[in-house]
Image: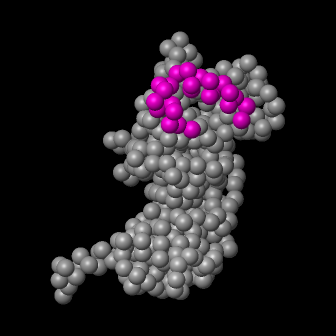
Amino acid sequence: MRSGAGTNQEAVRRHNLGTLLGHVHRLGRISRASLTTTMELNRSTIAGLVGELEALGLAEQAAPVASRNGAGRPSPDVVPRADGAYVLAVDVGVSGLEVARVGLGGEVLARVSAPIPASRTPEATVEAVVALLRDVVGDASAGSALVGVGVSVPGLVRRSDGLVRLAPNLGWTDLPFGEVLAERLGALADVRVGNDADLGALAEHVRGAGLDDADLIYLSGEVGVGAGIILDGHHLGGGGGYAGEIGHLQMDPAGQLCHCGNCGCWETQIGAPAIAKAVGCPHDQVASLGEFLAGMEEPNDALRQVGHDLGRGIASAVNLLNPRVVVLGGYLRPLYRLVREEVDTTLHSHALVAPREQVRVTLPALGADTVLVGAAEMAFAPLLQDPVAVLSHAATDVDRIFAGSA
Ligand SMILES: [Zn+2]
């Protein structure tokens, strides 16, 4: 029988194993010497943990890329094995579905996209997602372990269980999308659901424009507008996980009616329909708004106004939260290229000097992939907590997973 101390030691070892794997996953390549320093453990403990990750098929050792300063043998590098474990990432957008198979280390191994079914019903959407998942797992190597599925949804997602409380632009209310998808996959994969802006913030914080910033706001500008907020390195979710609905701050009491029932919400000023109206993009072609904006050389007056409105909202967020970086995602990406001057001018005149001096407004370093990468990171989280436990029940036989879905 195990003693309490033994059990405790085992828990510490598994925790260290997950922490070490987290470093390897995020950095892609790190020397054993750096791991020793970073984790404040001795060399033999690190060597043991690395050996265990090798045995699990999650990492391998490689000769150092360049010789390092100092005497003695250079320490070997540790690199993740992208084919050792992978996740499936799903971005459910208002107009399209993006699905990727992402290997340990963050490498996108396969990706496909498709329009969202016209009905946008949960049933049809799940079927379309399963078909795309089947496409991306097709080339997974034998023995590669599926360790999770991460789904991004543009709506209010309950943190405790991933229930989609409201996705107004999909017409979903109180939908257990993750549960339905997991059931459809034969319950062989852990499915997690998150809000698109939250996942955008996570991705840009872990791998993108906010890599070195503990305080970051990711603004997701789609049909709706939301914010993913990271303060002091921690995601700010609020009581139920619903924090960040910045698109419903009232900016103009006499403004346009919002779907939430109020007038003049920020998203009525800077959401995709507002941008489309400003540039004369037909209502039924909002999905191609990105191309519309990319084709413009100069902003017109209406678009300049959208830029000022964007700057004013960012100023409020800067005054409230004192972020170091504000990342503009979704349609705000092509928009900012055109109205940068308006955004910056209005931010300058509306934000308080002290927090404004500390903030930079920027585009996502991960480009259009930000939300998908965030969904993958969410799905990897359990593996990075306890690799042994997750691998012990992970599926390696993808044919079996999709056997019932052909
Ligand atoms: Zn509203």
What is the chief secondary structure element of the magenta stretch? helix
Relative side of 173 to 328, left or right: left
Q: Which of 327 and 381 lies nearest the eye of the viewer?
A: 327
Q: Residue at x 63, y 58 (%)?
A: 99
Relative side of 383 to 40, left or right: right
Q: Which of 325 and 71 lies nearest the eye of the viewer?
A: 71
Q: Residue at x 76, y 34 (%)?
A: 293
Q: Is residue 211 magenta?
A: no
Picture layout, residue 158 above or below residue 69: above
Question: Which quadrant of the structure image shows residue 305?
Answer: top right
Q: Residue at x 52, y 37 (%)?
A: 359
Instruction: Please state the extent of the stretch shown in magenta in the rendering.
Output: 337-360
Q: Residue at x 45, y 48 (%)?
A: 214
Q: Please identify the quadrant where the C terminus is shown.
A: bottom right
Q: Is residue 351 magenta?
A: yes
**Total numbered labels:** 0
The x, y position of residue 190, in whole percent, is 46, 64
The x, y position of residue 240, in whole percent, is 35, 43
